[in-house]
Image (spheres, rainbow, N blue to C red):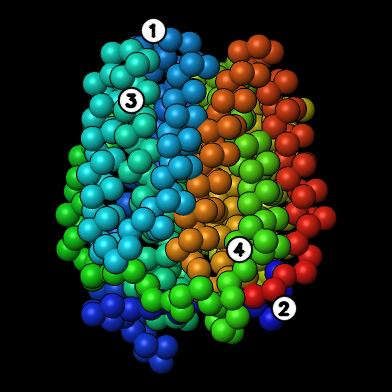
Amino acid sequence: MSSHTSTSLPAPTHDSRPGPSPEQRTTPWQWIGVAVLALSTFVVVTSEMLPIGVLTPMADGLHISPGTAGFSLSVTGVVTAVTAPVVPRVLGALDRRVVLAAAMVVLAVGNALTAAAGGFGLLVVSRIVVGVGMGAVWGLSSAVATRLVAPRNAMLAVSCTVGGVAAASVVGVPLGTLVGNSFGWRTAFAALTAAALLLTAGLLLVLPRLPRPAAPAGRGESGTARQPLLRNAPVAVGLLLTVFLVTAHFAAYTYVRPVLEERTGVTPGTVALFLLLYGLFGLIGNFAAGALAARRARHTVLGLAAGIGASILLLALFGTVASVTGFGMALWGLAYGGLSVAGLAWMTQSAPDRVEHITGLYVGVFTAAIALGAFLGGTVVEAAGSTPLLWSAAALAAVALTVGVCGGRKTRS
């Protein structure tokens, strides 16, 4: 990260219902808007990740193998990867509030189809629909959050919004796992359908009109021609690191339930508790990383990459010991929980006039890596088992850390 880049996300460009000016404070109503955005990302990511917590019963109910069921995450990730970067470029002057609300309706439809799926075919269709809704919501939410608050609160607003991702692990996936264990996995997806529809109304109620943010056409803040995003060192290095690190994470995490059941020998209830522990520390990591990344984004990301690699390595070496597994899950959650906000801060600080495009590109690459990780993890676990899967994921995390250490030392805003 450059020593002369901004230490927070850029000040928002407001519409006919402007947010606070730099000298004003963010009002409680504006924080409510941020909270609804956070709840939206919570439901979006829970919708994507819930198959992890109910993988075994879901596979049994659909008469497919756990590896095949896990590939459904790849479907969602691929669709989101295409949707997220495209959405900011095709919206034009459309009201972002309306777009977000429409995307939540799409998400509700996808979850309803998942709940009704009778086989792998409809499951794939349902996860495609979920991916479209997810790509639009996740791709826009962080950029929209900065427009709702005073500039000095921009990073906190992003941390809160991205915190919905960590909260999905803390509450969403464990709660969905408990619901699935108690009432069936279809009930868990039906509940997500209802939540998405409720949040659709909430977004329309609490958000102001949000047309396209204004920016000098083809120009950066200094008046010079805009550099292509992929030629911006922090953006390019950050995206490459994201590919390796998120692939490593999801190769292992997608199959964490069978890994814990086979290696550690725990019950389904204990699996839910381990996921809760992971999620609680993920929420802590999200806000801690957000605060650190405002000043030292690159170093924060490198620390998180090291933590993810170390935690997976712990599970590979000592995963048969329940206490060590618990510590490894906590460390894993702490490190991965901060990745979304820290990685986004690293890249947006280098091009503060292009937040929507960077966010969409970041989410696209992030979710493509989710898809790749779920696919590679399924391939390895089906062919070789859980232990080679963990070692492979740890090796990918080491590659990601190497990319971050060797690249992006000098940045320009």
Q: Position of residue 281 (x, y in %)?
A: 55, 49
Q: Earlier in the sequence, mark 4 or mark 1?
A: 1
Residue position for label 4: 228
Query: Could you say which quadrant of the image residue 122 lies in?
Result: top left
Query: Could you say which quadrant of the image residue 38 lies in?
Result: bottom left
Label 2 environment density (alpha carbons within 10 Å; few <14, some 14–19, many ≥20): few
147 shown above or below 112: below
- Measure how far apart labels 4 and 2 are at the Cα level: 21 Å
Amino acid type of the residue tagged 1 in the rendering: His
Q: Is residue 299 visible?
A: yes
From the viewer's perspective, is the residue at label 1 or at label 3 nearer? 3
Q: Secondary structure at mark 3?
A: helix
Label 4 environment density (alpha carbons within 10 Å; few <14, some 14–19, many ≥20): few
- Measure how far apart labels 2 and 3 are at the Cα level: 47 Å
Amino acid type of the residue tagged 3 in the rendering: Val
Discs 1, 2 touching: Cβ within 8 Å: no
